[in-house]
Amino acid sequence: MPIWAESKIPIKIVSITDGDTIKAKIDKNEFSVRLVDIDCYETSKIHRAYRQAYDNCIKIDEVVNLGNKSKQYLLDLYIKNNSKKVYLEFKGVDMYGRVLGVLYFDTMNVNEEMKKHGGCMVYEFKQ
């Protein structure tokens, strides 16, 4: 495995898409990042949101509400830790071309924080 794959790469967050996806930037290069090991509810009524509603026996509006809460929790974490450095631990690229990784605000593992308090479920990614 290359050495760079083991290290934390400093990034800038451009935007927060939802509780488990961000848009990041290194130099002038922007890219989507999917946070590994978590799965948050969707923030809009897309096909996947209906599947989440069915799988969890909840209404579609509740899925969207929970998804927006997860997104807001991640945004609040970012704002609260904005003076700290932001890092990405690279884990690969998914079939949609998104970077897979673990997000850190200084030493805080954001993926773990989202699992504990952000309304995200544990998700085992298989590529």
Image (cartoon, rainbow, N blue to C red):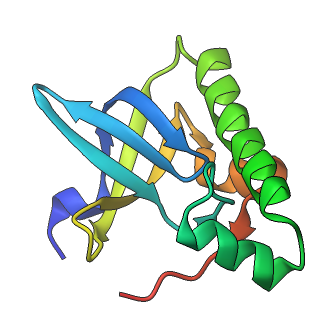
Please determine whether, in this image, residue 78 is positioned above or below residue 2: above
Looking at this rendering, what residue extends furthest in the top direction?
83
Looking at this rendering, what residue extends furthest in the left direction?
28
> Residue 74 in the image: x percent, y percent?
64, 36
Residue 37 visible in the current orientation = no
Number of on-image labels: 0
- Residue at image point 24% right, 32% down: 25
Of the pair 91 and 33, the residue shown nearer to us: 33
> Residue 66 in the image: x percent, y percent?
79, 50
Q: Quadrant of residue 76?
A: top right
Instruction: Name the quadrant of the N terminus.
Output: bottom left
Q: Quadrant of residue 81?
A: top right
Q: Quadrant of residue 121?
A: bottom right
Instruction: Name the quadrant of the C terminus.
Output: bottom left
> Residue 68 in the image: x percent, y percent?
71, 41
Left or right position of 81 against 2: right
Left or right position of 79 against 30: right
Of the pair 7 and 119, the residue shown nearer to us: 119
- Residue at image point 18% right, 62% down: 3
Residue 117 visible in the current orientation = yes
